Amino acid sequence: MIYLDYQATTPLAPEARDAMLRWLDGPGGTGFGNPHSAHRMGRQARAAIELARDQVAALFPAGGKVIFTSGATEALNLAIRGSGQGGTVSYSAIEHSAVGDTAQAVGKSHVLNVAADGQCNTRQDLPGDTRLVCVMQVNNEIGTIQPTIEWHRKAKENNALFLCDAVQAYGRIEVTGADMIAISAHKFHGPKGVGALWVRDGLDLDEVQTGGGQEFGLRSGTLSPALVAGMGAAAQRAKETLDQDAEHVRTLWNRATELFADWTINGSVEARWPGNLNIRRDGLDVARLMSDVRDVMFSAGSACASGSGRPSHVLKAIGLDDKQAKSSIRLGFGRYTKLDEIEEAAGKINAAAEAQGL
């Protein structure tokens, strides 16, 4: 099988797996301790978590604190719900549903428009009572890189906080400044089930999940040393190979765009993470295509919305009609993708599309 769905999840890095194994001990081992216990095994587990916290923090802006969560969805909920009450939450039209649905659930919300290239520019007004602005750094469906530095500046000018969903950016490009930043480990070759919210110095959040008061009194619940250690090791590897990975992905992008020259690219080609190739062929039956090319793992859109039958809200936001949105596919590649896999997958996908008379 050829895996081309890196926006949905990424293969676990060997370094992350190795870091996790110590903390998965059974009877007779010493790595299964509760990191919140005061005895020796607990302190050892806690030390592993604090090491991982430092490793994860190394890819964030200087200062601030890293709060471990179960993933980006929880991190985004903590940021939106814990950063205040009242006022309006403004978010871009192409945000993940973890942002959009939560913003709507907490009270007044306002949608920021995006252009046909997928860019959410700051040449639009915020409601006067905006308390929080949410703009992701890299979109998960079309890969467009957003002007988050400008949005952070505009939020401050309007006395609002700025939250950045950096799930698709962290470990791939430099994460820019914000008041709060959410990430998920399994998007940068770490394990599933763990993520983090970075909060700048001087910003106090309200507790959202009550209980034992772990994680700075903001996120109660026993942390998994294995998951957190795996996340830390994945972050460390990402930091060490950031430039190398980016060069490799650019090579894959250049070849992929040659192979899919007859397709239309959705979203900006320039302001884009090149590991995301979202393309369409008008009239394409994507369900049939995926059935005909079962040994290539790719997406008909966001994995979080797959099976809903609804056209992508991201593709609709950039001006595609329902038929165009439903004739689009997303190919995602990264560190462990080989060039010959791109070439083989392209051959099969193009042949299957041509078999539909396209």
Image (cartoon, rainbow, N blue to C red):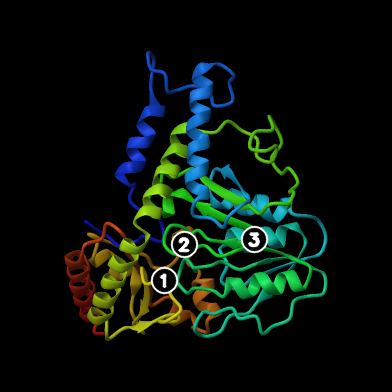
Screen quadrant of the C terminus: bottom left
Q: Residue at x 44, y 33 (%)?
A: 226
Distance from Cα at disc 1 to Cα at disc 2: 9 Å
SS at mark 1 in the image = loop
Of pointers 3 and 1, the one earlier in the residue sequence: 3
Q: Is residue 138 above or below residue 54?
A: below
From the image, tell me which residue sits under label 3: 101
SS at mark 3 in the image = helix
Q: Is residue 51 above or below residue 263?
A: above
Q: Amino acid at mark 3?
A: Asp
Q: Are marks 1 and 2 in contact (CB under 8 Å)?
A: yes
The answer to whether residue 87 is left or right of residue 12 is right
Distance from Cα at disc 3 to Cα at disc 2: 19 Å
Q: Residue at x 22, y 77 (%)?
A: 350
Q: Can you give x and y, in whole percent of width and height, for residue 190 in the image?
A: 40, 47
From the image, tell me which residue sits under label 2: 168
Screen quadrant of the N terminus: bottom left
Distance from Cα at disc 3 to Cα at disc 1: 25 Å
From the image, tell me which residue sits under label 1: 273
Crowd band around label 2 with a 10 angstrom C-alpha radius: few (<14), some (14–19), many (20+) = many
Mark 3 vs mark 1: give the one in front. Answer: 1
Q: Amino acid at mark 1?
A: Trp
Q: Are marks 3 and 2 in contact (CB under 8 Å)?
A: no
